[in-house]
Image: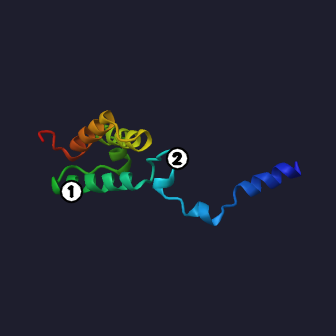
């Protein structure tokens, strides 16, 4: 039992180099609290304010179909790389996010 307790507590210690890991160093891209998530939310809030649209909470914006589509395309692009399919999905999701379908 002592060994398990020691191992548990040791597993929570972090080396200095572990604190320096950035998003680019991650083995798998994590959307939650990422720069992409924050930027997309900020952009949507600015667009909605400029259009004087009804206010939506952060959670409602994150749950919206447009944001979920954007999230999926960003995660695929970061995790699987820049394939033609992933780039096209990203392009289309950005156009929907910014509401510029005609371009």
What's the residue at 29%, 41% (across, down)?
90
Report x, y in % for residue 29: 46, 46
- Specify the label residue 86 is tagged with: none
Mark with earlier residue (2, 1): 2
List the residue tagged with mark 2: 27
List the residue tagged with mark 1: 49
Q: Classify mark 2: helix, strand or loop.
A: loop
As measured in the structure, the alpha-carbon distance from the residue carrying label 2 to the one carrying label 1 is: 36 Å
Nearest-to-viewer mark from 2 and 1: 2
Tell me how many marks there are: 2
Colour scheme of this structure image? rainbow
The quadrant in which residue 49 appears is bottom left
Residue furthest to the top: 85
Report x, y in % for residue 95: 21, 43
Q: Who is closer to the viewer here, 84 or 42?
A: 84
What's the residue at 23%, 57% (across, down)?
46
Report x, y in % for residue 59: 38, 47
The quadrant in which residue 91 appears is top left
- For the C terminus, the image quarter is top left
Dot 1: few (<14), some (14–19), or many (≥20) neighbours within 10 Å? few
The quadrant in which residue 96 appears is top left
Q: Classify mark 1: helix, strand or loop.
A: helix
């Amino acid at each position: 039992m002592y060994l398990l307790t020691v191992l548990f507590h040791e597993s929570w210690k972090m080396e200095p180099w572990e604190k320096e890991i950035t998003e680019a160093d991650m083995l798998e891209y994590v959307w939650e609290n990422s720069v992409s998530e924050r930027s997309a939310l900020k952009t949507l809030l600015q667009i909605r304010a400029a259009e004087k649209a009804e206010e939506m909470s952060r959670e409602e914006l994150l749950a919206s179909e447009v944001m979920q589509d954007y999230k999926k395309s960003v995660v695929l692009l970061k995790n699987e790389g820049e394939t033609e399919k992933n780039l096209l999905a990203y392009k289309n999701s950005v156009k929907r996010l910014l509401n510029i379908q005609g371009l």
